[in-house]
Image (cartoon, helix red, strand yellow):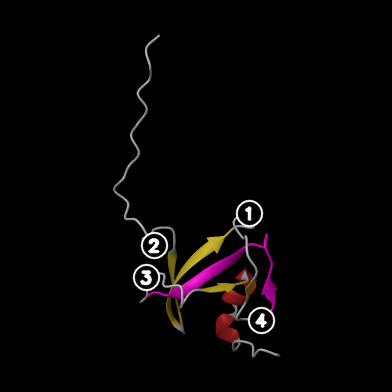
Amino acid sequence: MPRRNSPKPDDSRPLGGGVGWARTESGPDGDWLVRAISGAQAQKTYRCPGCDHEIRPGVAHVVAWPARETGSVEERRHWHQACWNSRGRRWPAARRW
């Protein structure tokens, strides 16, 4: 029986800093690149800058960074989806400790 030729993987994608998986959002605080993280992808604990509560592993959330950056680690922030959506209506929370 003849073999099926499987298609070759497309290697035209840039390695590393590509942002094809992020969407751009504009708001009063500027332009942002935003990526949705599913609960299955969330592996670490982060602190949401909107509410100052922890985002535990397994909790879906978003990662956002200024659009002028290309995904630099220093500028990325992990937000609860609701906190990200309401960021224009309130200030970032002050750390309590």
Q: CA distance from mark 1 to mark 2?
A: 20 Å
Residue located beneath label 3 in the image = 70
Quadrant of the snapshot with the N terminus:
top left
x and y percentages locating residue 61 in the rendered image: 61, 66
x and y percentages locating residue 3 in the rendered image: 38, 16
Q: Which residue shows up at 62% across the image and 77% down it?
A: 48
Q: Residues within 10 Å of mark 1 (few under 14, many from 20)?
A: few
Asked whether the residues under the numbered discs 4 and 2 touch, taking CB atoms below 8 Å apart as contact, a structural biologist would say no
Start-end of magenta stretch? 52-67
Name which residue type carries label 1.
Ala
Asked whether the residues under the numbered discs 1 and 3 touch, taking CB atoms below 8 Å apart as contact, a structural biologist would say no
Q: Nearer the viewer, mark 4 or mark 3?
A: 3
Taking 14 as reference, is 74 left or right? right
Q: CA distance from mark 1 to mark 3?
A: 25 Å
Residue located beneath label 1 in the image = 40
Q: Secondary structure at mark 3?
A: loop
Q: Which residue shows up at 64% across the image and 57% down it?
A: 39
Asked whether the residues under the numbered discs 3 and 2 touch, taking CB atoms below 8 Å apart as contact, a structural biologist would say yes
Q: Secondary structure at mark 4?
A: loop
First in residue order: circle 4 vs circle 3: 4
Q: Residues within 10 Å of mark 2 (few under 14, many from 20)?
A: some
Taking 53 as reference, is 8 left or right? left
Closer to us: 91 or 94:
94
Residue 66, magenta (yes or no): yes
The image quarter containing residue 7 is: top left
First in residue order: circle 1 vs circle 3: 1
Can you say whether 72 is above or below 14 in the image?
A: below
Residue located beneath label 2 in the image = 19
